[in-house]
Image: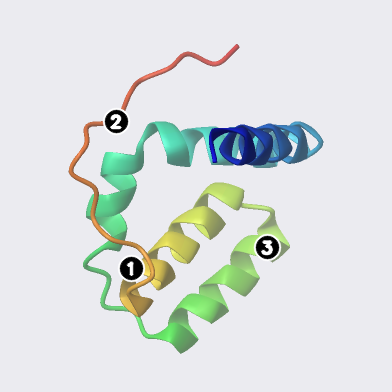
Amino acid sequence: MEKDKNEGLTEIEKTIGEMPEKKQKAIYWILSEWEVVEKICKSSKMTNEEIENYKKKAREKEDYTLLGLLCAAQAYRDGTVKQTDQPSKKKTVP
């Protein structure tokens, strides 16, 4: 089980490392500021149609942080993400 988890994390790290820097920075911000992301996204009143429209615009503008926030809002709205009780761990960018 632990080996599978480590392999999965290694694959995620590799995939993120192959992404353009803009995407890497957006992912890092979202993960490092998850408490803020939760507060912004868990009580969103946007409809799925609104979220999809904004996601399209975010992709066109290459605004990956906004895209990530919209995806998180959609996941909270759909119930696929649960609120976390653990504090975030601040890390510095290598």
Q: Is residue 34 left or right of residue 39?
A: right
Q: Camera-side residue: 4 or 71? A: 4
Q: Helix, strand, or loop for circle 3?
A: helix
| Residue labelled with disc 2 | 88
Give the quarter of the image for residue 53: bottom right
Q: Helix, strand, or loop for circle 2?
A: loop
Q: 30 above or below 40? A: above
Q: Is residue 69 left or right of residue 83?
A: right
Contact flag, marks 2 and 1 (Cβ < 8 Å): no
Q: Which mark is residue 67?
A: none
How far is the residue under mark 2 from the one under mark 1?
A: 18 Å
Going 22% across and 52% down the picture, which residue do you hit? 39
Q: Amino acid at mark 3?
A: Arg
Q: Amino acid at mark 1?
A: Tyr
| Residue labelled with disc 3 | 59
Going 26% across and 77% down the picture, which residue do you hit? 45
Crowd tier of the residue under label 2, counting other residues whose Cα lies within 10 Å: few below 14, some 14–19, many 20 or above: few
Contact flag, marks 2 and 3 (Cβ < 8 Å): no
Q: Is residue 12 left or right of residue 51?
A: right
Give the quarter of the image for residue 20: top right
Specify which label sits upstream in the sequence, 1 or 3.
3
Number of numbered markers:
3
Specify which label sits upstream in the sequence, 2 or 1.
1
Q: Camera-side residue: 27 or 83? A: 83
| Residue labelled with disc 1 | 76
Q: Helix, strand, or loop for circle 1?
A: helix
In what quadrant of the picture does the N terminus appear?
top right
Specify which label sits upstream in the sequence, 2 or 3.
3
Q: Horizontal and vertical percent for residue 35?
A: 26, 41
Q: Horizontal and vertical percent for residue 19?
A: 77, 40
How far is the residue under mark 1 from the one under mark 3?
A: 20 Å
How far is the residue under mark 2 from the one under mark 3?
A: 27 Å
